[in-house]
Amino acid sequence: MSGIATIYQNLKGDKVIWLIVALLSLASLLAVYSATGSMAYRMRGGNNEYYLFQQAFFLTAGMGAMYAAYKLHYMQYSKLAPLLLLVAGLALLWTLGFGTEINEAKRWITLPWIDKTIQTSDFAKPVLIIWVARALAVKQDYIKDFKQAFLPIIMPVIIVCALIAPEDLSTAALLFVTCLLMMFIGRISLKYVFLLILMGVIALSILVMIGSVFPDLVRVDTWISRINEFIYNTDGGYQLQQSKIAIASGEIAGVGPGNSMQRNFLPFAYADFIYAIIVEEYGLIGGFTILGLYSWLLFRCTRIVTRCPKTFGAILAMGLCLNIVIQAFANIAVSVQLVPATGLTLPLVSMGGTSILFTCISLGIILSVSRYVEEAQFKQAAIEKMEDASTN
């Protein structure tokens, strides 16, 4: 324990965010181990720990990537943003044309030689947020100008979201809303923000029309079925019904770790509906704890924003944080049937590879901002102390 305490003390940046990451990772290991027990028994010859070790590997790799992102000065991401955006755009185009189809969705590309898949939208999300933060910071002097500021910022947002939407509307919508909030924080004129919303509606309408003519290009049927299942509780409502049963079974304190019954009936209990399993096993106490951790993360990032001396760092940290927190709240809202099923995972908790990796990288960048904010405050305090000493 003393070794862990020493490591914790030596970490720079917001230590509370480090703690939140550790607690969410622990929750992930417990929840994934429980949610995948029966699946591991069926598919891995009784090796119940298979998915636990796999998730532990993903989290370890994610923590390594987070530490690397944290060590790099956050201003370096501003320099890399144009190149990263180009790579993300090409990767999304390749996915649409030649992507690997899993669960009737073409969201992945298979990496050669290692035969592993990567979800390109997970990579595109932090990249677009970095680029928007950079553009908003660079254009602050004429941020209200339509041609010089708004149009150059909005076009990549529309293009990237449009490339993601045909196969993953929920991720595209999440990213669009995040960029919208970033523009509001970055002082883009409100009339342009409303114009952006209108452009988003028009783009969605165009996609629906394309999907109705070419159903293989846009998953309109899936969107309609999810809305119908939410409103009318049609056949597809099975997932939501099982999720509600799991949550109701948990009551206040839950049925206990590893004692979930609904994991045997709830599809994707380890991913989309892992929150329901957490509430079933740990009750409302566990459910509100998870909610509290994401809310705490949002509060700490807001604190970083108010102290950051540079516009880019402030908008970057807030954008990445909003993307994580909004996705978490959307996932939880699906589990309690407040919104239609989205397919969004619970960040850092659901089982996954690229999702955990890029969530950790996003958190590492946030910690990089907090690290240099902290150092700037120490330097400023030292200067003020020296000035006071020389005055006296």
Image (tube, rainbow, N blue to C red):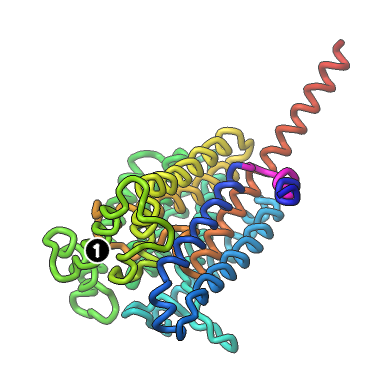
- Reading the image, the residue beneath label 1 is 242
Foreground: 254 or 123?
A: 254
With 221 as the anchor, is 259 left or right in this view? Answer: right
Residue 365 in the image: x percent, y percent? 61, 53
Residue 296 in the image: x percent, y percent? 49, 41
Which element type, helix, strand or loop, lies under badge 1? helix
With 282 as the anchor, is 15 left or right in this view? Answer: right
Kindly indicate the quadrant of the structure image that contains residue 240. bottom left
Foreground: 169 or 128?
A: 169
Residue depicted at x 55% and y 35%: 303
Residue depicted at x 34% and y 72%: 167
Mark 1 Cα-neighbour bin, 10 Å: few <14, some 14–19, many ≥20: many
Residue depicted at x 59% and y 42%: 16
Residue 263 sits above or below residue 15 on the image:
below
Q: Is residue 331 visible?
A: no
Kindly indicate the quadrant of the structure image that contains residue 158. bottom left
Residue 227 in the image: x percent, y percent? 19, 62
Foreground: 6 or 11?
A: 6
Residue depicted at x 38% and y 62%: 259
With 117 as the anchor, is 287 left or right in this view? Answer: left
Foreground: 338 or 287?
A: 287
Does the segment drawn in magenta span residue 12? yes
Does the segment drawn in magenta span residue 248? no
Farthest bottom residue in view = 113
**Three-letter amino acid code of the residue under disc 1:** Gln
Read off the magenta span.
7-15
